[in-house]
Amino acid sequence: MKSKTQGSSIEKEKLEIIKWVTTLKDETSIERLKMLMDSKSKLDWWDQISDEEKNAIEKGLDDIKAGRVKPHSEVKKIYEKWL
């Protein structure tokens, strides 16, 4: 749940955007904003990646759950000659 400060911060940002939009004179910018507003599709990055990438992510999550992980400091020592 959002706190009141987060909500008011978002509202403040929205008002700043509205104020900025009212000053636009460039038709291209306005058209782009209209396209964004009219865009019905909500693209989820998960739907945009390959099955191979999804499998790699799922394998990584399984490794985390199974405790097959190494601390960052240990990995850094192993790969420091390439960094």
Image (tube, rainbow, N blue to C red):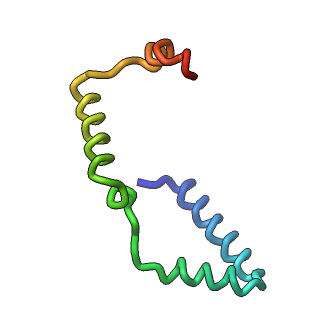
**Is residue 50 rendered to the left or right of residue 38?**
left
| Left or right of 32 in this view: 16 | right
The image shows residue 12, relative to residue 18, as above or below, that is: above
Q: Which quadrant of the structure image shows residue 65?
A: top left
Q: Residue at x 49, y 83 (%)?
A: 38
- Residue at 75 percent across and 83 percent down: it is 26
Q: Quadrant of residue 66?
A: top left
Instruction: Look at 72% across and 76% down and name the residue there.
Output: 19
Work out whether residue 51 or residue 36 is closer to the camera in this orientation and state it. 51
Where residue 31 sits: x, y (%)?
63, 85
Quarter of the picture holding the C terminus: top right
47, above or below 80, in the image: below
Q: Quadrant of the image for the N terminus?
A: bottom left
Foreground of the two, 21 or 25 = 25
Give the camera-side residue of 62 and 8.
62
The image quarter in which residue 27 lies? bottom right
Q: Is residue 13 left or right of residue 4?
A: right
Q: Residue 35 in the image: x percent, y percent?
A: 54, 82
Residue for point 26% across, 44% down: 55
Percent coordinates x, y for residue 13 in the rendering: 64, 64
Residue 73, image x, y percentages: 48, 15
